[in-house]
């Protein structure tokens, strides 16, 4: 078969609805903005882990859908979240990525969230406790009790992760949102406190969904020499991709043969509670959050879209808080040898999605992206992506194969004449 001409290259493939999508959904700026409004502002987002706020008055800052957020632990040990915005003049209050309010800042007192612009101060519950020259400026027209921070829905769940929803009235509770996919690991993650021992982030010139895609299928393990050597056996190929409500997928476990890779060792001695040795589970949550437990270490990825062709990915490695110093060092070594910035796998995945991002920039010609592999929902099946984009279409009310068509009007892919 000769190489295809333009008409053949852009034609719809001979696959069914859901087995391919239009690349415009990765490159269209309007779609990217709409995703923030329709999806990310209404989702439960795991922003950090409670161990990153170990003491009262500790805080972290982040963002969801361009909204700046501050998460802090109060003196009552409660973790709360607020918009990181002063109600006075809309100033960003805290610029540091993390720290403590225990010590006073240049503009304010200890144990207070202080806006440096005009020295307004707030407590760990978001109450305004001080307005500079309040009576002189506002007389009795406005008082500090009326100008607290904007609180956000915040819960600590599933092994101590901190979840935020920008919607005051989310359509589904956090338990109903993620409880079923986490069931395979719930007993393990809740057995004893976990602790973050590794953090790094990457800004990649690609669409956030492409990172999610590479976590949703293992067909790309041909790219990972380590995975081929330690895992390509009958048990590996029999692993199931199980779909759950809300677009989530769980990848079933098998025993990884680490000792087959030169210089590596079994991780059985540091397996997480209630799991057989050297297991590998993965919980993939819509619209782009991943919990990956490989024997002795748990990895969590969170995505923050920065545009149609740019994404911030935050990577965390976690172990047991009760680890001895020796066990912790071993756990860190195990984690970083696979998933650290210079590990065996992570940089290869990033190269893959960066290559896709290069071909799907905002002004590139739309083309057909195939999700049509069918292998009885096992590890090289692409059912995880088909399930994901079905959910994406519902939230966006856009057909993944014809983005200008409402999802409710979708038709079999072979009948869509012009999907551009």
Image: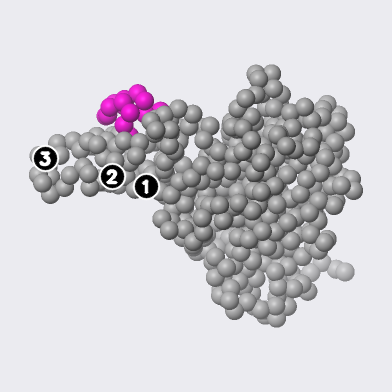
Q: Residue at x 31, y 26 (%)?
A: 110
The rendered magenta stretch, by its main secondary structure, is classed as loop
Residue closest to the far right: 234
Tell which of 321 and 371 is nearer to you. Answer: 321
The disc placed on residue 151 is 1
The answer to whether residue 203 shows anywhere in this view is no
Q: Position of residue 374 (x, y in %)?
A: 81, 63
Classify mark 3: residues with Cα within 10 Å, few (<14), some (14-19) or many (20+). few
Q: CA distance from mark 3 to mark 2?
A: 17 Å
Q: Which region shows up in magenta?
A: 100-113
Q: Position of residue 99 (x, y in %)?
A: 43, 29
- Please identify, in this view, whether the residue under mark 3 or under mark 1 is nearer the observer: 1
Tell which of 51 and 61 is nearer to you. Answer: 51
The disc placed on residue 356 is none
The residue labelled by disc 2 is 148
Q: Residue at x 79, y 42 (%)?
A: 224
The answer to whether residue 328 shows anywhere in this view is yes
Q: Position of residue 361 (x, y in %)?
A: 60, 57
Label 1 residue SS: loop
Q: CA distance from mark 3 to mark 1?
A: 26 Å
- Check the picture and name the quadrant holding the C terminus: bottom right
Q: Residue at x 68, y 55 (%)?
A: 249
Residue 96 as seen in the image, left or right of residue 337: left
Asked whether the residues under the numbered discs 2 and 1 touch, taking CB atoms below 8 Å apart as contact, a structural biologist would say yes
The residue labelled by disc 3 is 135
Q: Position of residue 263 (x, y in %)?
A: 83, 26
Residue 222 as seen in the image, left or right of residue 420: right
Residue 395 as seen in the image, left or right of residue 382: left
Q: Is residue 24 above or below residue 216?
A: below
Label 3 residue SS: helix
Q: Residue at x 65, y 18 (%)?
A: 325
Q: Earlier in the sequence, mark 3 or mark 1?
A: 3
């Amino acid at each position: 078969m000769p190489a295809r001409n333009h008409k053949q290259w852009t034609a719809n493939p001979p696959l069914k609805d859901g087995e391919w999508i239009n690349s415009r959904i990765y490159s269209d700026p309007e779609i990217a903005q709409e995703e923030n409004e329709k999806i990310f502002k209404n989702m439960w987002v795991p922003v950090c882990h409670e161990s990153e706020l170990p003491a009262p008055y500790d805080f972290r800052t982040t963002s969801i859908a361009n909204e700046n957020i501050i998460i802090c632990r109060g003196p009552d040990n409660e973790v709360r979240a607020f918009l990181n915005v002063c109600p006075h003049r809309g100033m960003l209050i805290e610029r540091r990525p993390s720290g403590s309010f225990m010590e006073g800042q240049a503009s304010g007192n200890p144990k207070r969230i202080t806006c440096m612009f005009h020295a307004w101060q707030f407590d760990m519950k978001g109450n305004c406790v001080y307005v500079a020259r309040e009576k002189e400026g506002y007389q009795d027209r406005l008082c500090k009790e009326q100008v607290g921070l904007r609180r956000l829905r915040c819960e600590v769940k599933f092994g101590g992760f901190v979840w935020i929803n920008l919607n005051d009235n989310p359509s589904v509770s956090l338990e109903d949102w993620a409880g079923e996919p986490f069931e395979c690991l719930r007993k393990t993650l809740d057995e004893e406190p976990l602790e973050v021992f590794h953090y790094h982030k990457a800004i990649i010139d690609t669409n956030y969904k492409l990172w999610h895609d590479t976590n949703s299928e293992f067909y790309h393990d041909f790219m990972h020499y380590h995975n081929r050597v330690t895992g390509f056996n009958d048990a590996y190929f029999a692993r199931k991709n199980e779909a759950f409500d809300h677009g989530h997928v769980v990848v079933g476990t098998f025993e990884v043969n680490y000792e087959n890779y030169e210089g590596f060792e079994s991780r059985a001695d540091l397996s997480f509670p209630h799991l057989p040795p050297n297991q590998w589970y993965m919980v993939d949550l819509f619209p782009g959050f991943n919990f990956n437990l490989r024997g002795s270490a748990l990895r969590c990825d969170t995505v923050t879209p920065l545009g149609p062709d740019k994404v911030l990915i935050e990577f965390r490695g976690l172990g047991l808080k009760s680890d001895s110093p020796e066990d912790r060092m071993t756990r860190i070594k195990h984690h970083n040898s696979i998933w650290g910035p210079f590990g065996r796998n992570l940089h290869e995945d990033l190269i893959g999605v960066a290559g896709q991002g290069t071909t799907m920039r905002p002004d590139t010609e739309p083309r057909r992206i195939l999700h049509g592999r069918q292998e009885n929902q096992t590890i090289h099946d692409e059912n995880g992506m088909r399930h994901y984009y079905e959910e994406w279409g519902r939230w966006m009310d856009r057909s993944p194969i014809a983005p200008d068509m409402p999802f409710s009007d979708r038709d079999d892919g072979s009948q869509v004449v012009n999907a551009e």
